[in-house]
Amino acid sequence: MISRVILVLVLVLCAFSASGIDTGKAFDDPEMQARYERLIAEVRCVTCQNQNIRDSNAFIAADLRREIRRLMSEGKNDAEIQDFLVTRYGDFVLYRPRFSGKTLALWVAPFLLVLFGSVAIFRVVRHRMSLPINDEGQAK
């Protein structure tokens, strides 16, 4: 009997946690709803940090979703909404930060890593090819 009561309590708690994310439509207009979905998918939850606000059930994510809905209802475009979020939370809040002096390392670092890795692989292969081969067909 007690195990059934505990099971019911656990299921009720799971139902409340599952309803934490507002899954309802934000706008009746399909174009606005698609724009809203795209925006909330591109904004990082400042609490979760590796999750967008669309999937996060943190309180700050719910506040950000409400704020984005409000700004869209006021007629703000995507750039203005992103400016508002960056001003308030910094460049970290966007999954794709803008190209600026502060974010230069984020944009250049991957290309430099690939370049240095390619040069290193090329040098290792060239060095290995210049080694003499012994009678068994292996490099010395």
Image: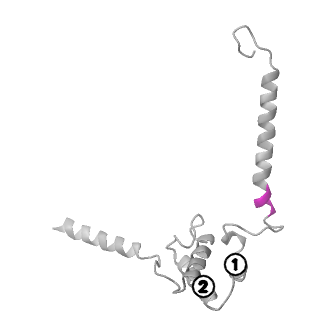
Q: Is residue 96 left or right of residue 101?
A: left
86 falls in the magenta region: no
Q: Magenta: predominant secondary structure element?
A: helix
Among the 4 quarters of the image, the one containing residue 74 = bottom right
**Residue at 74% across, 17% down:** 139
Q: Residues within 10 Å of mark 2 (few under 14, many from 20)?
A: some
Q: Residues within 10 Å of mark 1 (few under 14, many from 20)?
A: many
Q: Is residue 33 left or right of residue 129?
A: left
Q: Residue furthest front?
A: 30
Q: Which residues are magenta?
A: 104-108
Res 22 seen here: yes
Tell me the CA gap for discs 2 and 1.
Answer: 11 Å
* Residue on which the image places disc 1: 82
Quarter placement of the C terminus = top right
Q: Residue 67's mark? A: 2
* Whether residue 6 is situated above or below residue 106 in the rendered picture: below
Q: Residue furthest bottom?
A: 74
Q: Nearer the viewer, residue 72 or 120?
A: 72
Quarter placement of the N terminus = bottom left
